[in-house]
Amino acid sequence: MGRVKVNLTLDADVAETARTLGLNMSRVAEAAIAEASKVERNRLWRLENKAAIDAYAEEVAQEGLPLAQFRSF
């Protein structure tokens, strides 16, 4: 996928510090947005699948891990 131009508004001190340090603000912002997107996507997945996760956790609590008798540790 290609790149798109977007407008961001940053605190002046943050932008100046980044410039002084020679940071590529576009790349830093892209990495931060990608990480925030991943965290939010995972949070939403856990929320959407909460019932199944809770049901499995309850099953394991009551019956133990499946195939536990085959564990070698």
Image (cartoon, rainbow, N blue to C red):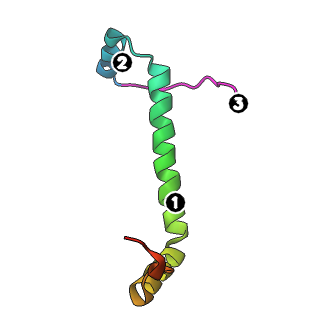
Q: Residue at x 47, y 58 (%)?
A: 43
Magenta segment: does it hold 34? Answer: no
Q: Quadrant of the N terminus?
A: top right
17 w.r.t. 36: above or below: above
Left or right: 19 with respect to 56?
Answer: left
Image position of 23 with respect to 39: above or below = above
Residue 37, position as x, y percentages in the image: 51, 45
Where does residue 69 sit, x and y in percent of width and height?
A: 45, 82
Q: Which mark is residue 15?
A: 2
- Label 2 vs 3, first from the N-terminus: 3
Residue beneath label 1, please? 44
Q: State whether residue 14 is above or below residue 39.
A: above
Q: Magenta segment, which residues?
A: 1-10
Q: Residues within 10 Å of mark 2 (few under 14, many from 20)?
A: some
Q: Nearer the viewer, residue 43 or 7?
A: 43
Q: Amino acid at mark 3?
A: Met
Q: Are marks 2 and 3 in contact (CB under 8 Å)?
A: no
Residue at 49 percent across and 64 percent down: it is 46
